[in-house]
Amino acid sequence: MSDLSPELRAKILHLLRERVNAAEIARHTGATRARIGAINAHLTRGTYEKVQNVEMLNELEASTETTFGVERDLQIKTPTSVS
């Protein structure tokens, strides 16, 4: 996974604020849907208003993207009903 440039992050944030869906943003920008989900999560939490350091933003997004991936994998592998 590569870090996003400030310009690409700004473009993704703009599209998210315009309520463009993640799949369309991914097609338009080349960013992964997981990364877009992480950016959206931080947008919702107000992280971008608090953190202005680009390196820190990349680390936050990457950790959130990893968390979403692990959570998704657990949901796929966990049985839907427990007897």
Image: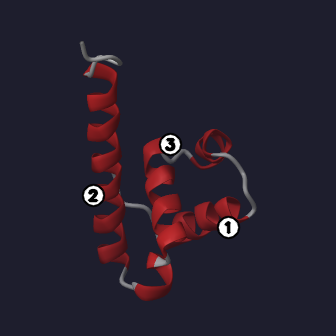
* Camera sees residue 1: no
- Specify the farthest residue to the front: 83
Residue denoted by label 1: 14
| Amino acid type, mark 1 | His
Residue in the foreground of this view, choosing between 27 and 36? 36
Residue 63 is tagged as 2
* Neighbours of disc 2 within 10 Å: few (<14), some (14-19), many (20+): some
Residue count near mark 3 (Cα–Cα under 10 Å), binned few <14, some 14–19, many ≥20: some
> What residue sits 53% from the left and 69% below the top?
43
| Residue 33 badge | 3
47 lies left or right of 55: right
Q: Please name the residue shown 43% across and 87% down the image.
A: 50
| 77 vs 15: above or below | above
Which type of secondary structure does the marked residue at label 3 adopt? helix
- Residue reaching furthest to the right: 18
Q: Is residue 4 left or right of residue 44?
A: left
Secondary structure category for the residue under label 1? helix
Q: Disc 3 residue type?
A: Arg
**Sequence-first disc among 1 and 2:** 1
Residue most extreme to the top: 83
- Where is residue 18? Give x, y as percent: 75, 62
Give 37 or 29, whichever is nearer the viewer: 37
Quarter holding the C terminus? top left
Q: Is residue 58 above or below residue 27?
A: below
The mark that comes first in sequence, 3 or 1, is: 1
